[in-house]
Amino acid sequence: MALKQRTTDYHCHILPGIDDGPKEQDESIEMARLLAKAGYREVYCTPHLIKGMYEVSNEEVLHERDKLQRELEKEGIGIKLLAGREYYLDEFLLDYISKPLLLEGTTSIMIEIPNNTSVDLVKETIFAVKRRGITPLIAHPERCFLLEIAEREPQSAGTLNRWFSRGGAQNNGNKSSNELLRYFKQLGCQFQGNLGSINGQYGGRVKASAQYFEKNGVYTHAGTDAHSPDAVKDILGIR
Ligand SMILES: [Fe+2]
């Protein structure tokens, strides 16, 4: 699918006081108002779950979702809030998903892959998630350097050294592909692109990845990944 705005936002930090999204409910309401104005009808609430940083329970996420939904109804904002989380891929993930909070109405969970992790841990964990009957939806793969396509990078020795020193590139000699991306596809993973990536909000490197994934039909879902009303405005180009 093309990475463009639709009527469902699959990735949004709209719930107040849970992670690094809005602190106050008023900001959450403003985000919903802006999203509705831009044509959205459904918004997945996907607060971070990161051990030691953002650890609220699934029950709290659902409670905050219900509370905000009631406020939106009072305000006459036609957005349906759907539950979810943005799971962080580390050694704690599999414990957390002994009771997973699936993206509502699906068999998927959203997983972000940090850049400072190893390909082996990523592969083992994603495989284990899939074995539990859960579909991994990879959050903003264009921001994950482990999934970069080497072909786009200038072919200088310095670049290649940096590339291999990150430990992420396992291209098996095929510069137009990425072994980890192929592995994910074989497992049946899904891929959520950030709308801000394609318009350069994370810089040229991420934009180039987003363009590559879009051109090659990698994306299955799109989201704003907005954390504030201003971010919604910037990402969607509205005021
Ligand atoms: Fe996010």
Image: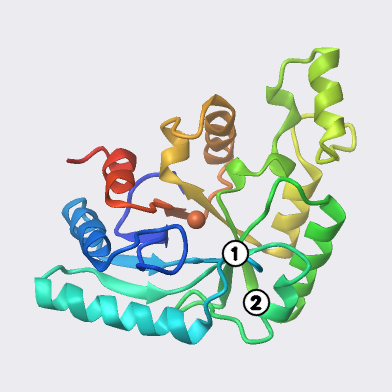
Q: Amino acid at mark 1?
A: Met
CA distance for labels 2 and 1? 24 Å
Residue 15 image-quadrant placement: bottom left
Q: Position of residue 34 (x, y in %)?
A: 20, 53
Q: Position of residue 195 (x, y in %)?
A: 41, 44
For the point 37% across and 74% down, which residue is it?
82
Q: Which residue is mark 2?
A: 134
Between discs 2 and 1, the one toward the N terminus: 1
- Which mark is nearer the camera, 2 or 1? 1
Rendered position, 141 above or below 40: above
Q: Position of residue 29 (x, y in %)?
A: 21, 64
95 horizontally vs 29: left or right:
right
Q: Which residue is mark 1?
A: 53
Q: Amino acid at mark 2?
A: Ile
> Residue furthest toward the top?
156
Ligand 1: does it lie within 8 Å of the C-beta at label 2? no
The crowd level at tag 2 (other Cα within 10 Å; few <14, some 14-19, many 20+) is: some
Residue 152 image-quadrant placement: top right
131 horizontally vs 170: left or right:
left
For the point 27% across and 75% down, which residue is it?
68
The crowd level at tag 1 (other Cα within 10 Å; few <14, some 14-19, many 20+) is: few
In depth, the one of 208 and 75 nearer the eye is 75
Q: Position of residue 180 (x, y in %)?
A: 78, 49
Rendered position, 35 above or below 157: below
Rendered position, 128 above or below 222: below
Residue 236 image-quadrant placement: top left
Q: Secondary structure at mark 1?
A: loop
For the point 76% across and 40% down, which residue is it?
178
Q: Secondary structure at mark 2?
A: loop
